[in-house]
Amino acid sequence: MTLKRRFFSAVLFSICVNSVAAQTPQVTRAEIDMLLKKLQISGCQFNRNGTWYTSAEAQSHLSKKLEYFEKKGMINTTEDFIKFAASSSSTSGKAYQVKCGNEAAVESNNWLNNQLKTLRAGK
């Protein structure tokens, strides 16, 4: 196989893999976007690796992680997003936490799953 032909084969393969891997279902993406918006406007604090961040900073960070996991084709459900991107640090493995007002901090997976239940119940 010529070098030119190998190059075009590699490019075509890459395009096919990336287009298949990045397909998050629209309904799932809409739920995730609503959860991220809910977090952003909540005014809650978000703990990542021992440092507290604003809800807007948390939303921005989780959006970047969402894009990363979408490119890997790992987000098929909103629960996948919570599990893979929004529950813990990819580098340290430490669980994220959410603290709203004077309430005790809770793990972000619990907070997000509760918000998802409320969202799906139409409240």
Image (tube, rainbow, N blue to C red):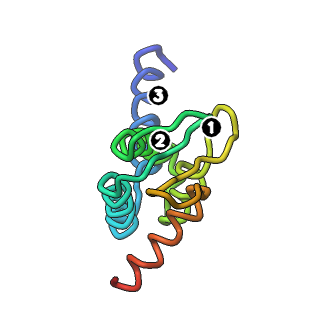
Query: How far apart are the two marked residues, 2 and 3, measured between alpha carbons?
Result: 27 Å
Residue carrying label 2:
65
Q: At x 70% / y 40%, what residue is drawn?
A: 93
Q: At x 38% / y 56%, what residue is drawn?
A: 39
Dot 1 surroundings within 10 Å: few (below 14), some, or many (20 or more)?
few
Q: Secondary structure at mark 2?
A: helix
Judge depth for marks 2 and 3 and give the one in front: 2
Residue 69 seen in the current view? yes
Residue carrying label 1:
90
Task: Give x and y (percent) for residue 106.
Answer: 60, 58
Residue carrying label 3:
10
The correct choice, above or below, for 2 with respect to 122 in the image is above
Residue type, numbered disc 2: Lys
Query: How far apart are the two marked residues, 3 and 1, measured between alpha carbons?
Result: 29 Å
Residue type, numbered disc 1: Ser
For the residue pair 26 and 41, the one nearer the viewer reads as 41
Task: Give x and y (percent) for residue 112.
Answer: 50, 63
- First-in-chain label (2 vs 3): 3
